[in-house]
Image (tube, coloured by chain):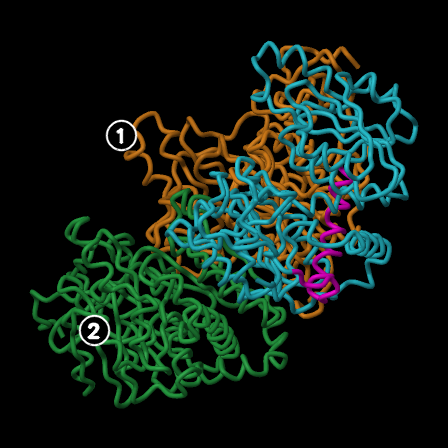
Chain colours: A cyan, B green, C orange
Amino acid sequence: MSANFPHLIDLDNYPVESWNNIVNLAIDIKRHQHIYVGACSGKIMATLFFEPSTRTQMSFQSAMLRLGGGIIGFDNPATSSVAKGESIKDTTKIASSYSDIVVMRHFIEGSVKAAALTADCPVVNAGDGGHLHPTQTLTDLLTLKAEKGTLSGLTVGFCGDLKNGRTVHSLLKALSRYDNNKFVFISTDELKVPDYIKDIVTSSGKSFTEVNSLEDAIPSLDVLYMTRIQRERFGSAEEYEKQKNVFCLDSKKMELARKDMIVLHPLPRVDEIALSVDDDPRALYFKQANYGMYVRMSLILSVINRDIRSQPLLTGKELPDVKCRNPKCITALEPSLPHSFRNCNGVLECEFCDERITDRQCTLY
Amino acid sequence: MSANFPHLIDLDNYPVESWNNIVNLAIDIKRHQHIYVGACSGKIMATLFFEPSTRTQMSFQSAMLRLGGGIIGFDNPATSSVAKGESIKDTTKIASSYSDIVVMRHFIEGSVKAAALTADCPVVNAGDGGHLHPTQTLTDLLTLKAEKGTLSGLTVGFCGDLKNGRTVHSLLKALSRYDNNKFVFISTDELKVPDYIKDIVTSSGKSFTEVNSLEDAIPSLDVLYMTRIQRERFGSAEEYEKQKNVFCLDSKKMELARKDMIVLHPLPRVDEIALSVDDDPRALYFKQANYGMYVRMSLILSVINRDIRSQPLLTGKELPDVKCRNPKCITALEPSLPHSFRNCNGVLECEFCDERITDRQCTLY
Amino acid sequence: MSANFPHLIDLDNYPVESWNNIVNLAIDIKRHQHIYVGACSGKIMATLFFEPSTRTQMSFQSAMLRLGGGIIGFDNPATSSVAKGESIKDTTKIASSYSDIVVMRHFIEGSVKAAALTADCPVVNAGDGGHLHPTQTLTDLLTLKAEKGTLSGLTVGFCGDLKNGRTVHSLLKALSRYDNNKFVFISTDELKVPDYIKDIVTSSGKSFTEVNSLEDAIPSLDVLYMTRIQRERFGSAEEYEKQKNVFCLDSKKMELARKDMIVLHPLPRVDEIALSVDDDPRALYFKQANYGMYVRMSLILSVINRDIRSQPLLTGKELPDVKCRNPKCITALEPSLPHSFRNCNGVLECEFCDERITDRQCTLY
């Protein structure tokens, strides 16, 4: 099946050149904002937030307004037609017929791709469960490019919950596509980067080290990417209390860092960065959030102007007898969707949620 | 009492010529959209959704944005001033003083007319309980006119819950005003079209037949109008399981239909149309939803430009001693409203909710 | 600490001349609205309503739209990032980086000032708990100026709950700054104006009288400012039933008033003004709500054009060892805020919520 519109579901559907174009256009928009006023005049964006996310939604909305476009949508699942039992497909289909671009967030993995299959305009993934959040990754790339001047040759530390963090995994995969980057993974043993992500890093020819101490790691870093560790991830409350300081950034640890190291965080932040760090000029997480608006302006403009080319949404094979085993996958919820799988080194991979069926060889095609 | 503004509460308040003007303008807007960009520039629409309805609200909002206007409003009763005990009148009065047009949806019958009585700008009914939803009817008329080329001489089948469906009743009343239409009612015995609607059809000189099988009826139809049957409407779960397939449209039944029959549905759809029908070119329910945006553009423009003339809201007589017996009527909730009744062939009819007081002769005037 | 932006947290931070400028500009905007269309074109306002308030939010939104600007924001705390444990500071900081002006309402006293400390654009207080609501006061001043032609020499009656009404206190303080105003306080003994407000009135050289009967007071008034008495404020249900009529305005009491007396109410109104009064030409509370839109247009324009000068947010002294004792103060919630106090005639006054620490002499500075 082939998409008629330049949907953005997964960054991996596009070549790195497209990422660079979006990042570079964002830099130009930030510099010469007045040129882009009215660039989307008369266009409408629908923000369909089946799961609320104030910051992401406000970021997209301000981006569209700054380009002169209008906004419709909802952020409150309880007040949407979904409450009446309507399928994601129907809701999105109709909203897309009112709009020039749909921005969708949903708690079900693969749901945004499923919606894009029948949409009447381009669809942008603003987060589908714990799966993908490509505009966060674009935000991170823009921040690095604008603040470090390059996306190559960087030593980037990731600190916190590296096991469950979709943001971390996406950025790691993205930075692995650029030259000479090195990674330092700073976490507890329980919250390490999963093997399949390490495989991607390694097979791209990049190296990483794993450490247990932020204090030890920080002096070597160009970039420190902090993430939340949710209390629930620890074995016990005592474990949490014991370990949390090891992975929290404070002014004392900042003293050990380079003068030109920058601190990023996808936000919201809770306890993992002390408030005193906010005043440090190297603390760029709020600026990073602001870059998010510019990268979304760039993306919206590129999509509406068709500057990025439409890519097929499903490239694998339909295997009606095979079922994805991920209970959070959209295919578990909407049975009429094609059971479409990629052949990934002999292992079947669901084309909606990217779950691998590891106990079954891909002998089917 | 006479309205100062061209409110749209009930299509019946306007002559058929006005309906045709709105439909024809909508066709022109769809064809020459660029001409209408900015036609409502500087104007503000308030969407007051005391009861949430994502699709209707998004349809109105995209309509206003495409005309260049702005939008305020709410869709979440819990967050509105109503939660503080404010009357509908006060909330609407104030919102109308900020706006050029108010679009209101409420779960109480007659509430939109009540609000219009004291509003400071035109008020459009976007659904008042199970009572009226005139812009859905205009959407249906536009779809028929645009797709069949005419509103006359059509054989229209209505399938599903024909007893409780306000959409069906309104469209039936509307199509009875055009020449040579014929109707086929397809439902269970329990969910038949009520007698007072049949009376309207018959007295307009139109004919109808009643059948129990969609399969039998479908070959003769120009238009098939599907509606939801809510599970709760059936006597039992077994009854539901037994009957539901009879009234569900699938690809097999579509094979029996004419090549130029079209399928409509007010949406949301749940089980009553199989997903496989979506790919049939005769399945027009998504296109119908899209026509809804154009008919609302036409309506908003006509109201703001005063192209439709203001009509009196209450034309009957105030009878302080008579009370409407409909517990869902706005007059039961807001006692200061006039007890205003129409004389309908000797029977009193509440001017807010259209309930008839059948046990009392209209000897009062 | 000094603010970089012309925040409006508390009217008292600005000289009376600034109030007059805002009121006079509002009168001009109402008269010559077409001149101001597009005055904020390309600008974005974020309305951050941590506590819902439909009317205030719609008033700000329609104001911004009429000036040609765009709107982002939320009105539903449950759907905001706050639900994920994010601090007010972080949420506001990020929203302010997307916007040209932030309008914030919160249920915690002093929270808006706290947010302004680190915001990246001007912040307007749209109500912080029971503390301040400066744009309501500006609305009242505009209504008086436009309808009575002056803000001086007026006899103003305040009726209802005068103890807890933040609106009443603010307006009293404001009118005390103009010449020759006289006040009549009409309430039960339990709901009298608090002493510290009376002190402000007296020390400004104005006089007041206190009465128990609206009927007795009304003939002498130029302005009657009505407020809600919440049922819960009375000792018992019987007490409420007995007293409520004394303080409710109806057509009979209106007969005792002057021909040119005007009735105001901050709304929402529940029972304290009979619906029949609405048709009296002296009942101006709905018009007052409409003035609210114009005064907000004036304020937004003044802030965005920097026509009002930025004022320091904190002018007192940081006393780390002293804690504000108001449990609803933002400093109780966000411990990293400075413990900043004003010296008010020898008594310490919290710079966030204005609570006085009466049992401790200000010997600290």
Asked whether the viewer can see residue B122, the reply is: yes
Residue C293 in percent (x, y) is at 59, 56
Q: Name which quarter of the figure residue B22 lies in.
A: bottom left
Q: Which residues are magenta?
A: A286-311
The quadrant of the image that shows the N terminus of chain A is bottom right
Instruction: Check disc 2: other Cα within 10 Å, few if <14, some if 14-19, many if 20+.
Output: many
For the point 14% across and 61% down, the residue is B190
Disc 1 sits on a residue from what chain? C
Q: Name which quarter of the figure residue A129 lies in.
A: top right
Identify the residue under disc 2: B185
Left or right side of A291 for A84: left
Identify the residue under disc 1: C238
Which mark, by number, is residue C43?
A: none
Residue B292 in percent (x, y) is at 45, 71
Q: Mark 2: which amino acid?
A: Phe
Left or right side of B163 for B174: right
Q: SS of the residue at dot 1?
A: helix
Disc 2 sits on a residue from what chain? B
Alpha carbon distance from label 1 to label 2 = 58 Å
Q: Mark 1: which amino acid?
A: Glu
